[in-house]
Amino acid sequence: MQRMAGLVGKPNTGKSTFFSAATLNPVKIAPFPFTTIEANKGVAYVRVKCVCREFNVEDNPKNSICIRGNRMIPVEIVDVAGLVPEAWKGRGLGNKFLDELRRADVLIHVVDASGSTDIEGRRTPPGTHDPCKDIEFLEKEIAMWIKQIMLRDWRRTVRQAEHMGGDEINTLYERLSGLKIRREDVVKALNETGLKGKKLSNWREEDIEAFSRKIREISKPMIIAANKVDISTARENIEKMKEKYGEKYRIMPCSAEAELVLRRAAERGLVEYIPGDGEFKVINEGKLTEQQKRALKIIQEKVLDIWGNTGVQQIINEAFLKLLKMIVVFPVEDINRLSDHHGNVLPDALLIREGTTARELAYMIHQELGETFICAVDARTKMRYGENYRLKMNDVIKIISAKSR
């Protein structure tokens, strides 16, 4: 099942620019609130080092892309329309926007680090708004949204728990399963809020709110994309955010606009640039207009020279590889040629959850392969592993089943 990242934040922080940069999908971008009315959905990529160079082979990927030894693995991303305070009450079509987050596994909160938009997303002079307030408000909005979902038919939920013999865990899991929340998330949230063992009939409203905040933190972890770092006031604000929220969230500087310019320039053959690189190379300066030259110079001086990269690719990688604890494995059918039965070399790079077993991988590839699983073979060592072998990052694995014999 493909994982999804939700782009969230107040209006006018650069969310749609981030989305366009990550996906190269054209979306409406304008400097005023509520430009995005319907959620934009697209494909971004997690970038990892491909194993093709380690094995000294020329690969031909089918489910992903390999660019000079960098494997780009597709992931789903949704740009949710800007949220404003009290969105959970329906303000600014807030409930409609929040509902787009039901399928999200991880949240990327795009914050205007320059402090040049107020809490409603209106333009203000740079440095006049504290972006820490944006983090605080968005935490509350999503928690209150979950709380409202829980409060709907709360008496019925309590009766259901009693009917199930006081099984609060499964009752809450069933109530929240539509938010892509797992049973283990519910257990962890109950433990960390001290509510485990407390009957739902005895829960007060503050208990429901505390649980809602915790279940969001666990089931939909969040990273802060500190955007607009090309504006001078961003540096001080990023330090403020790190000081206040650095222990809770990973706060990563970025310039979505710079990334979008570089990706579009690369797409048009004007520069050489792989998303995530800390540099670009002009291919033919004579093709560039004066305006394009100035834009590239600004990106170099105000973004790359100071921050090392635009941050967009790094944030996507962090969201999936670190927050969601995912790894990449390369399943093959021929461990000598590293190919599938069509002869495609290293055809697939699969993003899977850390801790996935060999048999679980077999089921991901094909139901019958999982049912008739015998063992997994490591292409590097030729060692055989049983069904409970936990896969590691960059494993190149062949699944042997009764069917394949």
Image (spheres, rainbow, N blue to C red):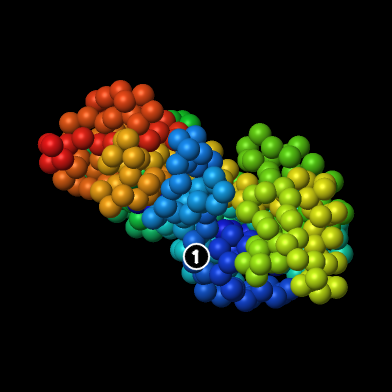
Compared across the picture, whether 404 is left or right of 246 comes to left
Which residue is painted at 73% across and 40% down in the image?
242
In this view, the residue in front, 403 or 373, is 403
Amino acid type, label 1: Gly
Q: Residue 265 placed where, x, y %? A: 69, 66
Residue 272 appears in the rendering: yes
Which residue is painted at 29% across and 33% down in the image?
358
Which residue is painted at 62% across and 67% down in the image?
267
Residue 151 appears in the rendering: no
Compared across the picture, whether 359 is left or right of 118 comes to left
Which residue is painted at 76% across and 45% down in the image?
308
Q: Residue 274 placed where, x, y %? A: 63, 54
Q: Residue 33 placed where, x, y %? A: 68, 73
In this view, the residue in front, 90 or 251, is 251
Compared across the picture, whether 400 is left or right of 117 comes to left
Compared across the picture, whether 189 is left or right of 363 comes to right
Please count the marks in the image: 1
Q: Residue 319 placed where, x, y %? A: 55, 46
In this view, the residue in front, 395 or 245, is 395
Q: Quadrant of residue 201?
A: top left
Q: Which residue is mark 1?
A: 42
Q: Quadrant of residue 377?
A: top left
Q: Quadrant of residue 165?
A: top left
Element carrying mark 1: strand
Relative height, residue 27 to residue 111 (above, below): below
Q: Residues within 10 Å of mark 1 (few under 14, many from 20)?
A: some
Q: Looking at the figure, which quarter contains the C terminus?
A: top left
In this view, the residue in front, 17 or 140, is 17
